[in-house]
Image (spheres, grey):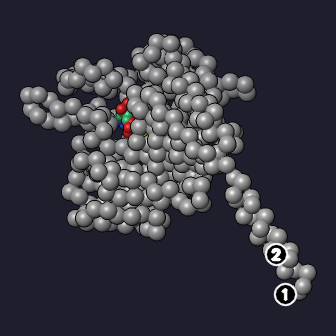
Amino acid sequence: MTRFKLPLLIITIFSFFVLISCQDNTENSLVFDAMDTSMVIRSFGKNSAEANRLAQKRILELENLISVTKDTSEVWKINNAGSYAQPVSEDTATLLSLSLKVAEESGGALNPCLYPVIREWGFTTGDYKVPSASKIAELLSKTDYSKIILKKNENFSEVFMQPEMMIDFGAVGKGYAGDCAIAVLKEQGIKSAILDLGGNVQTLGPKTDGSLWTIGIKSPWNGTPVAGVKVKDKAVITSGGYERFFVDSETQHKYIHIFDGKTGRPVENDVASVTIIAESGLYADSLSTTLVVLGKDGAIKFWDAHKDFDFIMILDDKTLMYTAPLKDYLIIDYDFEKVIVVS
Ligand code: AMP
Ligand code: MG
């Protein structure tokens, strides 16, 4: 090294450390209720308190837009528009367009218009019951998602539906809310944040020290962590029957909140939980529900055809199944009966 280069190197290293030490990593957390769950936004940076507040505002606005039960929401308006065309916001158009795409690709495992059936079983109203076969058949006739037309015009989008059809973003709303909140945090200059939106975890950047976040995967049996996955800039979103269900008092049969659109009944398979890891929260949330419906073999086939996400599936018989690209990022903390790597 020449005499001239050494001081230059020292100055560069010194400036680097000054820069690092000047970074403001003030941490702020905001806890609130939205979309029927408890949410936490934790971000780091000079502006983190204000950024969190604006992200929360965006989530609450979204909740008011897409709630299927509030009679002031846009979704409520669409669901009660009969066969008239309804102009819709960009948010609704984005949610519907992705939902219809995944519905198509999954052969209807995801179906954004199952609400008439789901409501009849008592999910969202709390009045749980097993409807008669004829009632289920009658309501199923209103759930053909191929009859929904989303027309994108130059300045706005509009939706056409058959009368009595209803859309519901219960399977995708929280994931999309996470994406929107992260977009707000980014606009506010935040480089590192972690959001827990009722068990859906979404991360912005790495931790402030540059290392990856470790996101715990819960046991579907007792809620304790059974695994951890290391990520940055990713959504880690889980679905499973353990999250919401009711037990028929006469038969003691358990009915979960995720439905098979072909039968109009809650899914009954050996999947205990599915965790999706993907860049987009909306995509990850849509797939967590989809893969529960598809089951073990369907999930493998779907992943093979797409490979633009990863998944971790826990089966009732204590099998853990995960996609090969997760290999170096997964920490297993439980004595599973069997571990299958899908490649
Ligand atoms: P998640 O917790 O993301 O799996 O979403 C579950 C919610 O999505 C349920 O509470 C229902 O509102 C809705 N849902 C249930 N089954 C389906 C399905 N097959 N397709 C679309 N949405 C569904
Ligand atoms: Mg979902």
Mark 2: which secondary structure? helix
The residue nearer to you, when weighing 291 against 15, is 15
- Amino acid beneath label 1: Met
Residue reaching furthest right? 4
Which residue is rendered at x = 79% and y = 64% of the image? 15
Which residue is rendered at x = 64% and y = 45% of the image? 45
Sequence-wise, the earlier of marks 2 and 1 is 1
Q: What residue did someone put label 2 on?
A: 9
69 sits left or right of 17 in the view? left
Mark 1: which secondary structure? loop
Residue 291 lies, with reference to residue 119, above or below; the image says below
In the rendered image, which quarter is residue 342 located in? bottom left
Do residues under tags 2 and 1 come within 8 Å of each other at their CB atoms? yes
The residue nearer to you, when weighing 48 against 161, is 48
The residue nearer to you, when weighing 41 against 315, is 41
Ligand 2: does it lie within 8 Å of the C-beta at label 2?
no
Q: What residue did someone put label 1 on?
A: 1
Gap in angstroms between the C-alphas marked 2 and 1: 10 Å
Which residue is rendered at x = 62% and y = 30% of the image? 54
Residue 277 lies, with reference to residue 258, above or below; the image says below
- Amino acid beneath label 2: Leu
- Name the quarter where the C terminus is drawn: bottom left
Residue reaching furthest bottom? 1
Which residue is rendered at x = 26% and y = 25% of the image? 121
- Horizontal and vertical percent for residue 35? 44, 28
Q: Can residue 264 be seen at all in this image of the molecule?
A: yes
- Horizontal and vertical percent for residue 268? 23, 42
Picture quadrant of ligand 1: top left
- Horizontal and vertical percent for residue 131? 21, 23
183 sits left or right of 336 in the view? right
Residue reaching furthest left? 250
Ligand 2: does it lie within 8 Å of the C-beta at label 1?
no
